[in-house]
Amino acid sequence: MESFSDMELVERAQGSDSSAFENLITRHYMTVYRAAYRWCGVKEDAEDITQEVFIKVARKFKTFAGKSSFKTWLYRITVNTAKDFGRKRSTRRAYVKAWSAETRETVTNPGKDVDLSTGELYAAIARLPSRQKAAALLVWAEGLTHREASRVLECSESTVSAHVFQAREKLKKLFIEKQ
């Protein structure tokens, strides 16, 4: 089943092939976990979010109509679940603590090199407004194009571009002030 595309697995799984559904979960588990971890920064919370995502996927699976790719649909559920989780739990302190243990690395800012720890970078991203944070994490951390991120966030591509630009400007300002 590993040679099947996501859409072929979706069709089989919607036709009650449980092994096809298991293959989809196995194939995308780490993608969801990484996105959740980047969102909250706490291993245990990311595991909880990932579990919740796949519970939602199982419940809503029959409603997936294929208007977007399965991966886009999955990212949308992941982002929304992470947002809900963040609202339910104050993870900001845990987020900073988890990332502050990371080794220091240099983050290049256009025009300046600023020495930041990964923790400081992700803590700064965590302080961004929700839409900017979501756009920034999907584009920068997950490597999605602005078009792909727009499908996940259910907004226009130009809106994603604007959110990423605003996030970059806010982070630049924070990093320059740090010097």
Image (cartoon, rainbow, N blue to C red):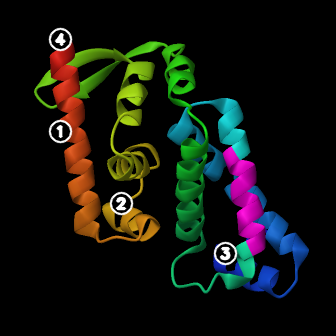
Determine if the magenta segment contains residue 55: yes
Q: Which amino acid lies under the numbered mark 1 shown in the image of this protein?
A: Glu
For discs 3 and 4, the disc positioned in front in the rendered view: 4
Please tell me which of labels 3 and 1 falls first in the chain. Answer: 3
Q: Which amino acid lies under the numbered mark 2 shown in the image of this protein?
A: Thr
Residue 102 point in image, percent of width and height:
52, 16
Residue 72 point in image, percent of width and height:
52, 68
For discs 3 and 2, the disc positioned in front in the rendered view: 2
User: Between marks 3 and 2, how big is the CA–CA gap?
Assistant: 21 Å
Q: Look at the numbered disc 3 and give the secondary structure of its residue.
A: loop
Towards the viewer: 52 or 179 = 52
Q: Look at the numbered disc 1 and give the secondary structure of its residue.
A: helix
Q: Which amino acid lies under the numbered mark 4 shown in the image of this protein?
A: Gln
Q: Look at the numbered disc 2 and give the secondary structure of its residue.
A: loop
Quickly name the residue at label 2.
Answer: 145
User: Between marks 3 and 4, how big is the CA–CA gap?
Assistant: 48 Å
For label 2, the crowd category at 10 Å Cα-Cα, with few meaning under 14, some 14 to 19 and many 20 or more, is some
Quickly name the residue at label 3.
Answer: 5
Please tell me which of labels 2 and 4 falls first in the chain. Answer: 2
User: Between marks 2 and 4, how big is the CA–CA gap?
Assistant: 31 Å
User: Between marks 3 and 1, how big is the CA–CA gap?
Assistant: 39 Å
Please tell me which of labels 2 and 1 falls first in the chain. Answer: 2
Q: Residue at x 65, y 45 (%)?
A: 33
Q: Which amino acid lies under the numbered mark 3 shown in the image of this protein?
A: Ser
Please tell me which of labels 3 and 4 falls first in the chain. Answer: 3
Residue 56 point in image, percent of width and height:
72, 65
* Span of residues in magenta: 49-59
Question: In the displayed structure, does residue 178 sit left or right of residue 60?
Answer: left
Mark seen at residue 179: 4
Quickly name the residue at label 1.
Answer: 169
